[in-house]
Amino acid sequence: MTLFSRQVMEQFGELDYEVYNYILKNSEKIPYMTIREVAKEAHVSTTTITRFCRKTMCSGFSEFKVRFKLEKEKKGSVKKRFDLSSITDFFERVNSDSFQKQLDTIAEVIAGKRQIIFIGTGNSGIMAEYASRYFCNIGIFSTGINGPMFPINLEFPEESIIIVLSVEGETNIIIENSSILKESSSTLVSITNSRNSTLARISDYNISYYIQKERKEMEEMKVDITSQIPAVYIVEALARLTMEKKQG
């Protein structure tokens, strides 16, 4: 069994995912770090890391490092142009009962609303437009807004649902506008990379995908190139489930 099989990751809690994300982001140096160093940099306790290791069927951090290095070397023996590990891990997790139940619960809420609005900025803004088009294509009218400054008219606030897409979940203007919309009595749903983000915490419902965040240096600026594949899956799954509930 691999360290991060679906069965293993179904046992993970919020802190476990924080450790998991840190390990993926720092995979090159993990085999050479002490448990205290990892705990300090990941902002968790050594006890949390020990529990995390045991959930991966390792006796402790030392065994985990050895197995992690061996798995990494095995995967690296075949040169890849695009690292699919975090994406394949995500698709293993979505098959869990808990993840599918989250999707089903949110789809049930969407099906009962008259107005559906998707919001995002940057890459997530493009996803918001795609989400709206996808919902419309299967017969569920919705609006997609790419940019937080666009005025939003909620004709029926209590019958409206706002679905915000954001990788970080920490963009100030998105958080401010989401708070205002929630205060208007509309339902707020967020699709983020982590449940620990500010946006996720203020939402009525949140679904998180936990994949490795990626940045690329381009002309003295950092560009977000985190994959949107998990967001695409979540949006399409919600659309199909919502359609089923409206028809059934």
Image: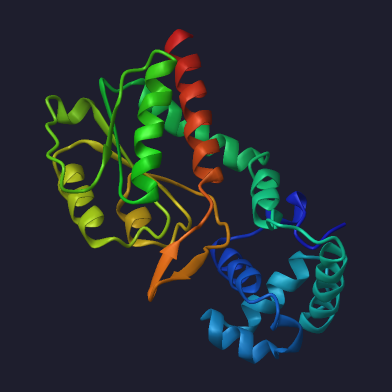
Residue 17: x and y, percent? Answer: 59, 64
102 lies above or below 89:
above
Q: Position of residue 45 (x, y in %)?
A: 58, 83
Q: How many marks?
A: 0
Q: Is residue 44 visible?
A: no
Give the color scheme: rainbow, by chain, secondary structure or one colour: rainbow
Picture coordinates of residue 62 (x, y %)? 81, 84
Q: Residue at x 35, y 38 (%)?
A: 128
Q: Is residue 72 above or below residue 200?
A: below
Q: Dividing the picture into quarters, in which one does residue 76 lie?
A: bottom right
Q: Is residue 52 above or below residue 198?
A: below
Q: Quadrant of the N terminus?
A: bottom right
Q: Quadrant of residue 113?
A: top left
| Residue toward you, 75 or 174 | 75
> Taking 31 as reference, is 1 left or right?
right
**Is 237 placed above or below 58 here?**
above
Going 47% across and 32% down the picture, which residue do you hit?
105
Q: Residue at x 48, y 55 (%)?
A: 193
Q: Is residue 215 left or right of residue 182?
A: right
Visible residue check, residue 3: yes
Is 46 placed left or right of 159 in the picture? right
Q: Residue at x 79, y 79 (%)?
A: 65
The one nearer the camera, 117 or 158, is 117
Of all residues, the one furthest to the top in this rendering is 247
- Percent of width and height locating residue 205: 38, 43
